[in-house]
Amino acid sequence: MTSADTKPNIVIIYMDDLGFGELSAYGATELKTPNMDALGNGGLRFTNGYATSATCTPSRYALLTGVYPWRNKNAKILPGSASLIIDTAQTTLPKLLRNEGYATGIVGKWHLGLGAGEINWNETIRPGPNEVGFDYSNILAATQDRVPTVYIKNGNVVNLDPNDPIQVSYEKNFEGEPTGLDNPEMLKMKWHHGHNNSIVNDIPRIGFMKGGEAAKWVDEDMADYFLADAQTYVKKNKDRPFFLYYALQQPHVPRTPHPRFVGKSGMGPRGDVILEADWVIGEFIKTLEKEGLLESTLIVFSSDNGPVVNDGYYDDAVEKLGHHKPAGPLRGGKYSLFEAGTRVPFITYWKGTIAPGVSNAMVSQLDLFASLASLVNSDATTEDSKNLMAVLLGKSESGRDELVLEATSRTAFRKGDWAMIPPYNGPARNDLVDIELGNDSVYQLYNLQDDIGQQNNLAESHPEKLQELIDSYRAILKNSDTDTEKLQLD
């Protein structure tokens, strides 16, 4: 689609736990997100845009590989000490772009594992982002609520003092180290569930860590830290085509807005960090504009999964939510097989090339691999990724017809206007986070055109349509060598 000398820069701005209903451009009335809205209103806003999964690691795996995450048994929420789950021999999005002459960088959240086996955090950590196609990486290993709470640049912990080595364990605490469980008096943010291990910056985390004091991040400065690095990356690589995967941490827990944003949303820290992220995106776009790159840069904006309000800390998110509906009209949320688990904001913006508009075509982050390969004249492809570049550019409404969706190793299916959830054992609701998971003893079938909120199960009244979706779903799954029985092939 482009000649060799006009390959556009490509930027993926990836949010963490941002729901379908969080942006004013997607109908939010309680939060003002002018910079995200500028992308949505100045570009193409998709109403049927999906992450592959209702949790972070699997979605990120699919984004970078173009492969359904349920095909990889390791593509599940990872501890901070997990090994890299992308095979270094695998073709990845950054690898295919690098092969076409692109500079490739990641700034922000990784959460796809590092190293192979036990990690020594005090030496260069390999393999990691740099071994799967990124020339440059400046990341947090997993999530903001997991240890190690340090930045890692090109495989090396930033500001590490060799006289204060880092130790990490997800099994047991180090002797004498305080924890959220045993030392609540040390906390500025109290844990609700799951976050009661090592304390860093007065915040209890998942996992245990000792040492590395000089390298530990300041949570409230994280947004500014990654913004500055993303801006520097753009300036440094502006004279050649570049790919930047800019993975923000907001609004994942712990929500720690910079003091500039505290109280700005009226919704507590969760709302404040969404406003912080909106500001960061605005500053980043200004940099592209100032460097004269806006008209030569394709921006894809999306989120790794749907929203969760209370995800492990007492932070006023529930109490101050008010009339805000993070999932918009959708049912469920993060961890859920209902639509809100995986249907997320999905925007493509390319000033002067993509005409502003709204698309109802079904698209998935899975399709960025084949679509961007086509854009840069690469023949790289995968069985799962579809070339929807014409759809992403607004030149076609012919999106996907079928999509397998995943939530914590369970799968569901979207075909046309219909969504099907197979029967699953397990609780109907995760009470800790107050989200419906989609588990039921019977098949669920919904017509999303008529019932976007999935209130009316049509499985009994539309047996032929149900069987059609079951057959299509099984046809995709039977090609998988995955060993999980939860894919409902029986």
Image: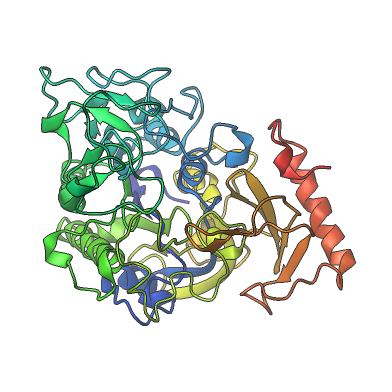
Query: Whole-percent x and y of residue 77?
Result: 48, 40
Q: Is residue 19 left or right of residue 402?
A: left
What residue is drawn where x is 10% and y is 31%?
Answer: 214
Query: Whole-percent x and y of residue 446?
Result: 72, 69
Q: Is residue 89 left or right of residue 286?
A: right
429 or 120: nearer the viewer: 429
Regarding residue 45, the answer to whether it shows in the image is yes
- Residue 127 quadrant: top left
Q: Quadrant of the C terminus?
A: top right
Regarding residue 231, the answer to whether it shows in the image is no
What residue is drawn where x is 32% and y is 38%?
Answer: 197
Query: Whole-percent x and y of residue 179?
Result: 27, 38
376 or 446: nearer the viewer: 446
Q: Is residue 328 above or below residue 192?
A: below
- Residue 303 quadrant: bottom left
What residue is drawn where x is 31% and y is 27%?
Answer: 173
Q: Is residue 143 left or right of residue 225?
A: right
The figure's colour scheme reads: rainbow
Q: Is residue 251 left or right of residue 1?
A: left
Query: Whole-percent x and y of residue 56?
Result: 46, 47
What residue is drawn where x is 48% and y is 55%?
Answer: 305
Count the marks. Answer: 0
